[in-house]
Amino acid sequence: MKLDQKNIELIKAYLQDKPVNRAYLFGSFVRGEAGPDSDVDILVELDYRNPIGLLFIRMEQDLARILNRKVDLVSAQGMSKYLKPVIDQEKQLIYAR
């Protein structure tokens, strides 16, 4: 299963006024391997001109509510160096400011 265009549009609309420069899907939804219990993996490149703080956690929770599915929100700046090559191979741009 892949994430449908309606849900991608919901993500884009939500991110419009958030400190996010780019957002990418990665993981099972990009590979077409997602099942009914799969989470949505989203990588974000944040704009740190203002403090982010708890907003990052709130964004993850809001996106989970909007998509009615668990969301794993990952910051590009805080991503593990071990995960980066794997994510970079499959990430799909869904939002750019």
Image: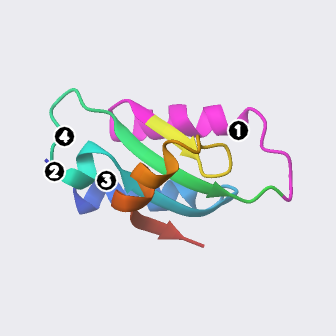
Kindly identify which residue carries mark 3. 7
How far apart are labels 4 and 1 at the CA level? 27 Å
Q: Position of 5 compared to 60: left or right?
A: left
Q: Amino acid at mark 4?
A: Ala
Q: Are marks 2 and 3 in contact (CB under 8 Å)?
A: no
Q: Amino acid at mark 1?
A: Leu
Q: Is residue 3 visible?
A: no
Tell us which disc is closer to us: 2 or 3. 2
How far apart are labels 1 and 2 at the CA level? 30 Å
Range drawn in magenta = 49-71
Q: Amino acid at mark 3?
A: Asn
Kindly identify which residue carries mark 1. 55
Q: Residue furthest top?
A: 37
Q: Residue furthest right?
A: 50
- Above or below 85: residue 97: below
Of 90 and 65, which appears nearest the observer?
Answer: 90
Of 84 and 7, which appears nearest the observer?
Answer: 84
Q: Are marks 2 and 4 in contact (CB under 8 Å)?
A: yes
Kindly identify which residue carries mark 2. 32
Kindly identify which residue carries mark 4. 34
